[in-house]
Amino acid sequence: MQKKYPIGIQNFEKLRRDGYYYVDKTEILYRLVTDGQYYFLSRPRRFGKSLLISTLEAYFEGKKELFTGLAIEGLVKEWKKYPVIHLDLNAKKFDESSDLIRLVDRQLLVYENVYGKEYTDETIDDRFVSLIRNIYEKTGSRVVILVDEYDKPLLQTINNPELQENYRNILKAFYGVLKTMDGYIRFALLTGVTKFGKVSVFSDLNNLQDVSLDERYADICGISENELKDNFSEDIKNLADANGQTYDEACITLKENYDGYHFNPWTSYGIYNPFSLLNTFAKTRYGSYWFETGTPTYLAELLKTSNYDLQEIEHVETDSDTIDSIFTDNNPLPVIYQSGYLTIKGYDQEFGLFTLGFPNKEVEEGFMKFLMPYYADVDKSKSAFEIKKFVSDIKSGNIDGFMARLKSFLAGCNYDLALDIERHYQNVLYIVFKLAGFYTQVEYRTSNGRIDLVIQTADYIYVMEFKLDGSAEEAMAQIEEKQYALPFAADSRKVYKIGVNFSSLTRNIDRWVVD
Protein backbone atom coordinates (compact mmCIF):
# COMPACT_ATOMS: atom_id res chain seq x y z
CA MET A 1 0.00 0.00 0.00
CA GLN A 2 1.31 3.44 -0.98
CA LYS A 3 2.24 5.64 1.98
CA LYS A 4 0.25 8.82 2.52
CA TYR A 5 2.90 11.38 3.40
CA PRO A 6 1.73 13.96 5.96
CA ILE A 7 3.11 16.95 4.04
CA GLY A 8 1.64 20.07 5.59
CA ILE A 9 -0.53 17.99 7.98
CA GLN A 10 -0.15 19.54 11.41
CA ASN A 11 -3.18 18.05 13.14
CA PHE A 12 -2.42 14.72 14.84
CA GLU A 13 -6.04 13.55 14.91
CA LYS A 14 -6.47 14.19 11.18
CA LEU A 15 -3.16 12.46 10.48
CA ARG A 16 -4.17 9.32 12.39
CA ARG A 17 -7.80 9.10 11.32
CA ASP A 18 -7.07 9.75 7.64
CA GLY A 19 -4.29 7.19 7.41
CA TYR A 20 -1.25 9.41 6.96
CA TYR A 21 2.10 7.90 7.84
CA TYR A 22 3.45 8.81 11.27
CA VAL A 23 7.03 8.43 12.52
CA ASP A 24 6.41 7.40 16.11
CA LYS A 25 7.65 10.11 18.48
CA THR A 26 5.39 9.15 21.36
CA GLU A 27 8.06 7.55 23.54
CA ILE A 28 9.93 10.87 23.61
CA LEU A 29 6.62 12.67 24.14
CA TYR A 30 5.84 10.45 27.14
CA ARG A 31 9.25 11.27 28.62
CA LEU A 32 8.50 14.98 28.16
CA VAL A 33 5.14 14.89 29.95
CA THR A 34 6.34 12.71 32.83
CA ASP A 35 9.75 14.30 33.52
CA GLY A 36 8.69 17.94 33.84
CA GLN A 37 5.91 20.50 33.75
CA TYR A 38 6.97 23.71 31.94
CA TYR A 39 8.91 23.60 28.68
CA PHE A 40 10.19 25.74 25.86
CA LEU A 41 11.33 24.22 22.53
CA SER A 42 13.01 26.09 19.68
CA ARG A 43 13.16 24.52 16.21
CA PRO A 44 13.33 25.91 12.64
CA ARG A 45 10.13 26.37 10.65
CA ARG A 46 8.60 23.32 8.97
CA PHE A 47 10.26 21.01 11.46
CA GLY A 48 7.16 19.48 13.08
CA LYS A 49 6.59 21.82 16.03
CA SER A 50 2.88 22.26 15.27
CA LEU A 51 2.39 18.50 14.92
CA LEU A 52 4.13 17.99 18.27
CA ILE A 53 1.76 20.50 19.90
CA SER A 54 -1.25 18.77 18.30
CA THR A 55 -0.01 15.34 19.45
CA LEU A 56 0.30 16.61 23.02
CA GLU A 57 -3.19 18.07 22.78
CA ALA A 58 -4.61 14.70 21.74
CA TYR A 59 -2.71 12.94 24.53
CA PHE A 60 -3.90 15.30 27.27
CA GLU A 61 -7.46 15.16 25.95
CA GLY A 62 -7.31 11.41 26.58
CA LYS A 63 -7.88 10.35 22.96
CA LYS A 64 -6.41 6.91 23.53
CA GLU A 65 -7.74 5.50 20.26
CA LEU A 66 -5.46 7.80 18.25
CA PHE A 67 -2.37 6.22 19.83
CA THR A 68 -3.20 2.59 19.06
CA GLY A 69 -0.07 0.76 17.94
CA LEU A 70 2.28 3.53 19.04
CA ALA A 71 4.97 3.28 21.72
CA ILE A 72 3.05 5.34 24.25
CA GLU A 73 0.20 2.82 24.28
CA GLY A 74 2.35 0.46 26.33
CA LEU A 75 3.68 3.18 28.61
CA VAL A 76 0.53 4.92 29.87
CA LYS A 77 -1.16 3.01 32.68
CA GLU A 78 -4.16 5.34 33.00
CA TRP A 79 -5.40 7.73 30.32
CA LYS A 80 -6.64 10.87 32.04
CA LYS A 81 -8.39 13.76 30.33
CA TYR A 82 -7.28 17.34 30.98
CA PRO A 83 -8.71 20.63 29.71
CA VAL A 84 -6.37 22.11 27.08
CA ILE A 85 -5.80 25.72 25.99
CA HIS A 86 -4.12 25.67 22.57
CA LEU A 87 -2.98 29.06 21.28
CA ASP A 88 -1.43 29.60 17.85
CA LEU A 89 0.32 32.90 17.08
CA ASN A 90 1.32 31.92 13.56
CA ALA A 91 -1.88 32.84 11.78
CA LYS A 92 -1.54 36.59 11.30
CA LYS A 93 0.54 39.36 9.83
CA PHE A 94 1.62 41.69 12.59
CA ASP A 95 1.68 45.24 11.24
CA GLU A 96 -0.10 47.24 13.95
CA SER A 97 -0.12 47.33 17.73
CA SER A 98 -3.69 46.01 17.81
CA ASP A 99 -2.95 42.93 15.65
CA LEU A 100 -1.51 40.86 18.49
CA ILE A 101 -4.35 41.73 20.87
CA ARG A 102 -6.98 40.85 18.26
CA LEU A 103 -5.40 37.49 17.48
CA VAL A 104 -5.16 36.41 21.12
CA ASP A 105 -8.61 37.86 21.80
CA ARG A 106 -10.23 35.64 19.15
CA GLN A 107 -8.57 32.53 20.52
CA LEU A 108 -9.39 33.28 24.16
CA LEU A 109 -13.04 33.91 23.23
CA VAL A 110 -13.39 30.31 22.02
CA TYR A 111 -12.54 29.02 25.50
CA GLU A 112 -14.39 31.82 27.35
CA ASN A 113 -17.60 30.86 25.54
CA VAL A 114 -17.27 27.40 27.08
CA TYR A 115 -15.88 28.17 30.53
CA GLY A 116 -17.08 31.72 31.17
CA LYS A 117 -15.56 35.18 31.17
CA GLU A 118 -14.93 37.83 33.80
CA TYR A 119 -16.23 41.03 32.20
CA THR A 120 -14.16 43.23 34.50
CA ASP A 121 -10.96 41.95 32.89
CA GLU A 122 -9.46 44.42 30.43
CA THR A 123 -6.10 43.01 29.33
CA ILE A 124 -5.42 39.65 27.67
CA ASP A 125 -3.20 38.59 30.57
CA ASP A 126 -6.02 39.32 33.07
CA ARG A 127 -8.39 37.32 30.87
CA PHE A 128 -5.84 34.49 30.69
CA VAL A 129 -5.67 34.35 34.49
CA SER A 130 -9.46 34.27 34.82
CA LEU A 131 -9.81 31.66 32.08
CA ILE A 132 -7.35 29.27 33.74
CA ARG A 133 -9.06 29.71 37.09
CA ASN A 134 -12.55 29.22 35.63
CA ILE A 135 -11.49 26.06 33.78
CA TYR A 136 -9.98 24.63 36.95
CA GLU A 137 -13.05 25.43 39.02
CA LYS A 138 -15.51 24.05 36.44
CA THR A 139 -13.64 20.85 35.60
CA GLY A 140 -11.74 20.11 38.79
CA SER A 141 -8.66 19.45 36.65
CA ARG A 142 -5.51 21.44 36.19
CA VAL A 143 -5.08 23.02 32.77
CA VAL A 144 -2.69 22.14 29.94
CA ILE A 145 -1.39 25.15 27.99
CA LEU A 146 0.16 24.76 24.54
CA VAL A 147 1.43 27.82 22.63
CA ASP A 148 2.56 27.35 19.04
CA GLU A 149 4.95 29.86 17.39
CA TYR A 150 5.01 32.08 20.47
CA ASP A 151 7.58 34.38 18.81
CA LYS A 152 5.88 35.11 15.48
CA PRO A 153 4.83 38.67 16.50
CA LEU A 154 8.39 39.46 17.61
CA LEU A 155 10.02 38.01 14.50
CA GLN A 156 7.73 39.87 12.13
CA THR A 157 8.58 43.18 13.80
CA ILE A 158 12.33 42.66 14.00
CA ASN A 159 12.87 45.72 11.78
CA ASN A 160 10.34 47.79 13.72
CA PRO A 161 11.87 48.16 17.22
CA GLU A 162 9.04 50.32 18.57
CA LEU A 163 6.30 47.87 17.62
CA GLN A 164 8.41 44.92 18.74
CA GLU A 165 8.90 46.54 22.15
CA ASN A 166 5.13 46.97 22.38
CA TYR A 167 4.57 43.29 21.58
CA ARG A 168 7.35 42.23 23.93
CA ASN A 169 5.70 43.99 26.87
CA ILE A 170 2.31 42.47 26.04
CA LEU A 171 3.73 38.96 25.73
CA LYS A 172 5.87 39.28 28.85
CA ALA A 173 2.76 39.93 30.93
CA PHE A 174 0.78 37.27 29.07
CA TYR A 175 3.37 34.49 29.43
CA GLY A 176 4.05 35.57 33.01
CA VAL A 177 0.62 34.12 33.83
CA LEU A 178 2.17 30.65 33.56
CA LYS A 179 4.14 31.36 36.72
CA THR A 180 1.47 33.18 38.72
CA MET A 181 -1.09 30.42 37.99
CA ASP A 182 1.32 27.55 38.67
CA GLY A 183 -1.08 25.74 41.01
CA TYR A 184 -3.73 25.54 38.30
CA ILE A 185 -1.49 24.24 35.51
CA ARG A 186 -0.70 20.57 34.79
CA PHE A 187 1.65 21.11 31.82
CA ALA A 188 2.81 23.89 29.50
CA LEU A 189 4.85 23.95 26.30
CA LEU A 190 5.79 26.97 24.21
CA THR A 191 7.37 26.44 20.80
CA GLY A 192 8.96 28.87 18.40
CA VAL A 193 11.87 29.53 16.09
CA THR A 194 13.85 31.94 18.27
CA LYS A 195 14.72 32.44 21.91
CA PHE A 196 13.77 35.76 23.44
CA GLY A 197 14.90 34.85 26.94
CA LYS A 198 17.74 37.36 26.85
CA VAL A 199 15.43 40.26 26.06
CA SER A 200 12.96 39.88 28.90
CA VAL A 201 10.01 38.01 27.37
CA PHE A 202 10.70 35.09 29.71
CA SER A 203 12.65 36.98 32.34
CA ASP A 204 9.98 36.45 34.99
CA LEU A 205 9.25 32.89 33.89
CA ASN A 206 12.18 31.14 35.51
CA ASN A 207 10.23 27.88 35.89
CA LEU A 208 10.31 27.33 32.11
CA GLN A 209 12.71 24.53 31.12
CA ASP A 210 14.41 25.16 27.76
CA VAL A 211 14.94 21.79 26.06
CA SER A 212 16.06 23.20 22.70
CA LEU A 213 19.62 21.91 23.21
CA ASP A 214 18.70 19.03 25.52
CA GLU A 215 20.27 15.76 24.36
CA ARG A 216 17.23 13.80 25.57
CA TYR A 217 14.95 15.64 23.15
CA ALA A 218 17.31 16.20 20.20
CA ASP A 219 15.08 14.17 17.87
CA ILE A 220 11.67 15.13 19.26
CA CYS A 221 11.14 16.93 15.93
CA GLY A 222 12.73 15.95 12.63
CA ILE A 223 13.90 12.49 11.57
CA SER A 224 17.02 10.73 12.80
CA GLU A 225 19.17 8.37 10.72
CA ASN A 226 17.73 5.34 12.53
CA GLU A 227 14.17 6.57 11.96
CA LEU A 228 14.94 7.11 8.28
CA LYS A 229 16.16 3.54 7.79
CA ASP A 230 13.46 1.98 10.00
CA ASN A 231 10.55 3.84 8.43
CA PHE A 232 11.54 4.68 4.86
CA SER A 233 13.74 1.89 3.42
CA GLU A 234 11.23 1.09 0.68
CA ASP A 235 10.82 4.80 -0.06
CA ILE A 236 14.59 5.18 -0.45
CA LYS A 237 14.61 2.26 -2.89
CA ASN A 238 11.82 3.86 -4.95
CA LEU A 239 13.67 7.19 -4.90
CA ALA A 240 16.87 5.51 -6.05
CA ASP A 241 15.08 3.71 -8.92
CA ALA A 242 13.42 6.95 -10.07
CA ASN A 243 16.75 8.80 -10.18
CA GLY A 244 18.98 6.11 -11.64
CA GLN A 245 20.81 5.53 -8.37
CA THR A 246 21.66 2.61 -6.15
CA TYR A 247 20.13 2.45 -2.68
CA ASP A 248 23.43 3.55 -1.11
CA GLU A 249 23.80 6.46 -3.55
CA ALA A 250 20.29 7.67 -2.69
CA CYS A 251 21.17 7.52 1.02
CA ILE A 252 24.27 9.64 0.39
CA THR A 253 22.29 12.22 -1.62
CA LEU A 254 19.60 12.41 1.08
CA LYS A 255 22.25 12.94 3.75
CA GLU A 256 24.07 15.62 1.73
CA ASN A 257 20.87 17.55 1.04
CA TYR A 258 18.64 17.19 4.10
CA ASP A 259 20.62 15.85 7.09
CA GLY A 260 23.07 17.67 9.33
CA TYR A 261 20.93 19.55 11.87
CA HIS A 262 22.36 19.29 15.37
CA PHE A 263 20.18 20.39 18.25
CA ASN A 264 22.72 19.78 20.98
CA PRO A 265 26.51 19.97 21.06
CA TRP A 266 27.19 16.48 22.41
CA THR A 267 25.52 13.90 20.16
CA SER A 268 27.28 13.05 16.91
CA TYR A 269 24.21 12.14 14.87
CA GLY A 270 22.34 14.70 12.78
CA ILE A 271 18.64 15.24 12.19
CA TYR A 272 16.97 15.30 8.77
CA ASN A 273 14.59 18.07 7.78
CA PRO A 274 11.23 16.23 7.76
CA PHE A 275 9.49 18.58 5.32
CA SER A 276 12.15 18.20 2.62
CA LEU A 277 12.49 14.46 3.23
CA LEU A 278 8.76 13.74 2.90
CA ASN A 279 8.47 15.90 -0.22
CA THR A 280 11.42 14.08 -1.77
CA PHE A 281 9.81 10.68 -1.15
CA ALA A 282 6.38 11.82 -2.33
CA LYS A 283 7.71 13.27 -5.59
CA THR A 284 10.67 10.87 -5.97
CA ARG A 285 12.76 13.89 -6.91
CA TYR A 286 15.40 15.84 -5.00
CA GLY A 287 14.58 19.52 -4.56
CA SER A 288 14.90 22.58 -2.34
CA TYR A 289 11.51 22.00 -0.76
CA TRP A 290 12.19 23.85 2.50
CA PHE A 291 13.22 27.00 0.63
CA GLU A 292 10.25 26.82 -1.73
CA THR A 293 7.98 27.56 1.24
CA GLY A 294 9.61 30.97 1.61
CA THR A 295 12.49 32.53 3.50
CA PRO A 296 11.76 35.63 5.61
CA THR A 297 13.18 38.81 4.09
CA TYR A 298 14.24 40.14 7.49
CA LEU A 299 17.17 37.69 7.44
CA ALA A 300 18.69 39.39 4.39
CA GLU A 301 17.95 42.81 5.85
CA LEU A 302 19.73 41.90 9.09
CA LEU A 303 22.81 40.75 7.21
CA LYS A 304 22.87 43.86 5.04
CA THR A 305 22.25 46.46 7.75
CA SER A 306 24.89 44.90 10.00
CA ASN A 307 27.39 44.87 7.08
CA TYR A 308 28.14 41.26 7.99
CA ASP A 309 31.09 39.51 6.34
CA LEU A 310 29.39 36.56 4.64
CA GLN A 311 32.62 34.60 4.39
CA GLU A 312 32.46 34.10 8.15
CA ILE A 313 29.05 32.46 8.05
CA GLU A 314 30.42 29.05 7.06
CA HIS A 315 32.58 28.65 10.14
CA VAL A 316 31.45 30.72 13.10
CA GLU A 317 32.70 30.33 16.65
CA THR A 318 30.40 31.75 19.30
CA ASP A 319 29.16 31.15 22.84
CA SER A 320 25.85 30.05 24.31
CA ASP A 321 24.83 33.61 25.24
CA THR A 322 24.95 34.56 21.57
CA ILE A 323 23.01 31.61 20.17
CA ASP A 324 20.42 31.95 22.93
CA SER A 325 19.79 35.62 22.24
CA ILE A 326 18.03 37.54 19.49
CA PHE A 327 19.42 40.11 17.02
CA THR A 328 21.36 42.61 19.11
CA ASP A 329 24.44 44.79 18.74
CA ASN A 330 24.45 44.41 14.96
CA ASN A 331 24.99 40.66 15.23
CA PRO A 332 22.54 38.75 13.02
CA LEU A 333 23.96 35.32 13.89
CA PRO A 334 21.46 34.35 16.62
CA VAL A 335 18.49 34.73 14.28
CA ILE A 336 20.28 33.04 11.35
CA TYR A 337 21.16 30.11 13.63
CA GLN A 338 17.81 29.80 15.35
CA SER A 339 15.95 30.01 12.04
CA GLY A 340 17.74 26.85 10.88
CA TYR A 341 20.19 28.28 8.33
CA LEU A 342 23.14 27.45 10.57
CA THR A 343 23.51 24.56 12.97
CA ILE A 344 25.96 23.28 15.58
CA LYS A 345 29.01 21.70 13.97
CA GLY A 346 31.24 21.39 17.01
CA TYR A 347 31.66 22.33 20.65
CA ASP A 348 34.74 23.24 22.67
CA GLN A 349 33.76 22.29 26.20
CA GLU A 350 36.84 23.88 27.78
CA PHE A 351 36.02 27.34 26.47
CA GLY A 352 32.26 26.88 26.01
CA LEU A 353 32.44 27.77 22.32
CA PHE A 354 30.10 26.49 19.63
CA THR A 355 31.15 26.14 15.99
CA LEU A 356 28.28 26.89 13.60
CA GLY A 357 27.92 26.09 9.91
CA PHE A 358 25.41 25.22 7.20
CA PRO A 359 23.63 21.94 7.98
CA ASN A 360 23.46 20.62 4.42
CA LYS A 361 23.57 21.42 0.71
CA GLU A 362 19.88 22.37 0.45
CA VAL A 363 20.31 25.10 3.07
CA GLU A 364 23.72 26.29 1.86
CA GLU A 365 22.74 26.58 -1.81
CA GLY A 366 19.25 27.86 -1.07
CA PHE A 367 20.52 30.55 1.29
CA MET A 368 23.01 31.81 -1.30
CA LYS A 369 20.31 31.91 -3.99
CA PHE A 370 18.05 33.76 -1.57
CA LEU A 371 20.72 36.35 -0.73
CA MET A 372 21.88 37.02 -4.27
CA PRO A 373 19.14 39.50 -5.34
CA TYR A 374 19.69 41.44 -2.10
CA TYR A 375 23.38 41.97 -2.80
CA ALA A 376 23.87 41.67 -6.57
CA ASP A 377 22.12 43.59 -9.32
CA VAL A 378 20.01 40.67 -10.54
CA ASP A 379 16.28 40.09 -10.61
CA LYS A 380 15.13 37.40 -8.20
CA SER A 381 13.33 35.47 -10.95
CA LYS A 382 16.44 35.53 -13.18
CA SER A 383 19.20 34.80 -10.66
CA ALA A 384 19.28 31.05 -11.39
CA PHE A 385 19.54 31.76 -15.14
CA GLU A 386 22.33 34.30 -14.61
CA ILE A 387 24.33 31.87 -12.50
CA LYS A 388 23.83 29.16 -15.13
CA LYS A 389 25.24 31.47 -17.84
CA PHE A 390 28.07 32.52 -15.52
CA VAL A 391 29.04 28.88 -14.87
CA SER A 392 28.70 28.05 -18.56
CA ASP A 393 31.23 30.78 -19.42
CA ILE A 394 33.58 29.50 -16.71
CA LYS A 395 33.38 25.94 -17.99
CA SER A 396 33.97 26.98 -21.61
CA GLY A 397 36.94 29.25 -20.88
CA ASN A 398 35.08 32.43 -21.87
CA ILE A 399 36.89 34.79 -19.48
CA ASP A 400 35.56 38.03 -20.96
CA GLY A 401 32.05 36.57 -20.81
CA PHE A 402 32.07 35.64 -17.13
CA MET A 403 33.96 38.80 -16.13
CA ALA A 404 31.39 40.94 -17.94
CA ARG A 405 28.62 39.03 -16.18
CA LEU A 406 30.39 39.51 -12.83
CA LYS A 407 30.58 43.22 -13.59
CA SER A 408 26.83 43.25 -14.25
CA PHE A 409 26.20 41.63 -10.86
CA LEU A 410 27.97 44.55 -9.20
CA ALA A 411 26.19 47.23 -11.23
CA GLY A 412 23.54 49.40 -9.64
CA CYS A 413 24.80 49.01 -6.09
CA ASN A 414 22.67 51.37 -4.01
CA TYR A 415 24.63 51.00 -0.78
CA ASP A 416 25.32 54.13 1.18
CA LEU A 417 28.89 55.24 0.52
CA ALA A 418 29.52 55.31 4.25
CA LEU A 419 29.29 51.53 4.32
CA ASP A 420 32.35 49.38 3.70
CA ILE A 421 32.54 49.18 -0.10
CA GLU A 422 35.24 46.53 0.02
CA ARG A 423 33.06 44.40 2.29
CA HIS A 424 30.20 44.77 -0.17
CA TYR A 425 32.41 43.64 -3.07
CA GLN A 426 33.60 40.69 -1.02
CA ASN A 427 30.05 39.69 -0.15
CA VAL A 428 28.89 39.83 -3.78
CA LEU A 429 31.92 37.82 -4.88
CA TYR A 430 31.34 35.32 -2.10
CA ILE A 431 27.70 34.74 -3.06
CA VAL A 432 28.35 34.53 -6.81
CA PHE A 433 31.33 32.22 -6.58
CA LYS A 434 29.73 30.18 -3.81
CA LEU A 435 26.82 29.46 -6.15
CA ALA A 436 29.23 28.74 -8.99
CA GLY A 437 31.02 26.37 -6.61
CA PHE A 438 28.06 24.01 -6.57
CA TYR A 439 28.81 23.33 -10.23
CA THR A 440 32.59 23.87 -10.27
CA GLN A 441 35.34 23.64 -7.66
CA VAL A 442 35.90 26.99 -5.95
CA GLU A 443 38.43 27.62 -3.20
CA TYR A 444 38.75 30.83 -1.16
CA ARG A 445 41.91 31.85 0.59
CA THR A 446 41.44 34.98 2.67
CA SER A 447 44.42 37.25 3.32
CA ASN A 448 44.40 40.75 4.80
CA GLY A 449 40.70 41.22 4.12
CA ARG A 450 41.01 40.45 0.38
CA ILE A 451 39.94 37.34 -1.49
CA ASP A 452 42.25 35.11 -3.49
CA LEU A 453 40.14 32.84 -5.64
CA VAL A 454 40.83 29.57 -7.45
CA ILE A 455 38.20 28.03 -9.74
CA GLN A 456 38.70 24.58 -11.22
CA THR A 457 36.67 22.93 -14.00
CA ALA A 458 37.28 19.83 -16.11
CA ASP A 459 39.36 21.84 -18.61
CA TYR A 460 40.42 25.08 -16.94
CA ILE A 461 41.92 26.49 -13.76
CA TYR A 462 41.44 30.18 -12.93
CA VAL A 463 43.71 31.86 -10.38
CA MET A 464 42.25 35.27 -9.50
CA GLU A 465 43.36 38.23 -7.37
CA PHE A 466 41.24 41.29 -6.57
CA LYS A 467 42.36 44.83 -5.71
CA LEU A 468 40.38 47.86 -4.55
CA ASP A 469 41.43 51.24 -6.00
CA GLY A 470 44.71 49.80 -7.19
CA SER A 471 45.20 48.35 -10.63
CA ALA A 472 44.61 45.09 -12.44
CA GLU A 473 48.35 44.99 -13.13
CA GLU A 474 49.08 45.17 -9.38
CA ALA A 475 46.73 42.25 -8.82
CA MET A 476 48.51 40.27 -11.53
CA ALA A 477 51.91 41.17 -10.05
CA GLN A 478 50.76 39.75 -6.70
CA ILE A 479 49.72 36.48 -8.36
CA GLU A 480 53.20 36.24 -9.86
CA GLU A 481 55.09 37.39 -6.76
CA LYS A 482 53.31 34.96 -4.43
CA GLN A 483 53.29 32.19 -7.05
CA TYR A 484 49.59 31.45 -6.61
CA ALA A 485 49.57 29.36 -9.81
CA LEU A 486 52.57 27.21 -8.87
CA PRO A 487 50.53 24.33 -7.34
CA PHE A 488 48.99 23.78 -10.79
CA ALA A 489 52.20 23.87 -12.85
CA ALA A 490 52.09 20.13 -13.60
CA ASP A 491 48.31 20.07 -14.19
CA SER A 492 47.19 19.13 -17.70
CA ARG A 493 44.38 21.71 -17.62
CA LYS A 494 44.84 25.20 -19.01
CA VAL A 495 45.69 27.70 -16.23
CA TYR A 496 44.56 31.34 -16.47
CA LYS A 497 45.78 34.05 -14.13
CA ILE A 498 43.37 36.98 -13.80
CA GLY A 499 44.06 40.28 -12.04
CA VAL A 500 41.00 42.41 -11.26
CA ASN A 501 40.64 45.94 -9.93
CA PHE A 502 37.54 47.46 -8.31
CA SER A 503 36.95 51.20 -8.28
CA SER A 504 35.16 52.78 -5.33
CA LEU A 505 34.48 55.75 -7.60
CA THR A 506 32.54 53.78 -10.24
CA ARG A 507 31.55 51.19 -7.62
CA ASN A 508 32.34 48.35 -9.97
CA ILE A 509 35.10 46.45 -11.75
CA ASP A 510 37.01 48.94 -13.90
CA ARG A 511 39.59 46.63 -15.45
CA TRP A 512 40.90 43.08 -15.58
CA VAL A 513 43.97 41.53 -17.17
CA VAL A 514 44.54 37.91 -18.14
CA ASP A 515 47.72 35.85 -18.51
Image (tube, rainbow, N blue to C red):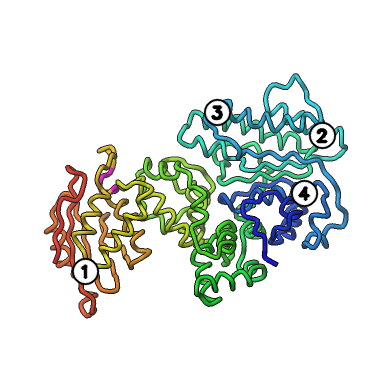
Q: Label 3, label 2: how many angstroms apart (C-alpha)?
A: 29 Å
Position of 220 relative to 92 (above/below):
below
Do the CB atoms of the residues marked 3 and 1 lie less than 8 Å apart? no
**Which mark is first along the chain, 4 or 3?**
4
Sequence-first tag of 1 and 4: 4
Give the residue at mark 1. Answer: 484
Q: Which numbered disc, 2 or 1, marks the residue closer to the eye?
A: 2
Magenta segment's dominant SS is helix
Q: Which residue is mark 4?
A: 58
The extreme top residue here reads: 120
Q: CA distance from mark 3 to mark 4?
A: 34 Å
**In contact (CB < 8 Å): disc 3 and disc 2:** no
Q: Amino acid at mark 2?
A: Ile
- Label drawn at residue 271: none
| Secondary-structure class at tag 2 | helix
Say the numbered circle drawn on residue 135.
2
Q: Which mark sits nearer the N-terminus, 2 or 4?
A: 4
Q: Which residues are magenta?
A: 420-424
